[in-house]
Image: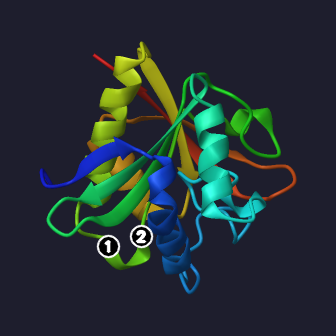
Amino acid sequence: MHSELILRPVTPDDAAHIEAYRAAFAGSEMRVTAEPGLIPGLDLLEQFESAAAWLKWCSEMQGRLSFFMSVRPADGKMIGALLLRHRLEYDDDDPEFASHIGYSIRPDARRRGYAKEQLRLGLEQAKAIGLTQVRLICADFNIGSIRTILANGGKLADSICGEESGLRVNRYDIRLT
């Protein structure tokens, strides 16, 4: 477990961190979304001209969406991003692709246990806003995410395929106790 990892809300002062995080995905070979420009946990960032504009939008979404970044306090590096949807809402080309939590870990920090800890911290945030169960989805080929969800108590609900994207995803439920 990475007890040195903290999950904190994004703020307008985080624009440089967000831009550096986005740049870390530019050459990533493993894409986990149907569209290569999307980075889970930073929903809609690709539609904004800058991270500063996106962060302004994030603050306007308070009460519906909560955006967090995982930071390693030892060096201040942004390791991951996590989005918490307060309600299960439409998320892809099919309403069945809804997820309470979207998250990612920067490519150069994967396979070190950060995702497991980040999701654990995200589940604490979900519980804090009153959720008793969350739904998570991930591409069926994303073994790292599958292991992360299972390690945090995820139970496979089913697997579905997006009509437009063709992306097959597993849907998991996690009860928050």
| Amino acid bearing label 2 | Arg
State the scheme by which the image is colored: rainbow
- State the residue position of label 2: 106
Residues marked 2 and 1 touching at CB (< 8 Å): yes
Residue 47 position by quadrant? bottom right
Q: Position of residue 46 (x, y in %)?
A: 71, 63
Q: Which mark is residue 109?
A: 1
Residue at the far right: name it.
164
Residue at horizontal 80 percent and vertical 40 percent from the top: 94
Residue 159 is at least partly visible in this image: no
Q: Position of residue 173 (x, y in %)?
A: 46, 29
Q: Quadrant of residue 2?
A: bottom left
Residue 85, quarter of picture: top right
* Crowding near the residue tagged with mark 1, few <14, some 14–19, many ≥20 C-alpha atoms within 10 Å: few
Percent x, y of residue 50? 67, 65
Q: Dot 2 lies on which element?
A: loop
Numbered-mark total: 2
**Secondary structure type for disc 1:** helix
Does the rendering let one see residue 171?
yes
Within 10 Å of the Cα at label 2, are there few (<14), some (14-19), or many (20+) other Cα atoms?
A: many
Residue 122 drawn at (x, y percent)? 36, 37
The structure residue drawn at horizontal position 29% and vertical position 70%, both measured from the top left corner, is 111
Label 1 amino acid? Ala
x 58%, y 37%: residue: 59
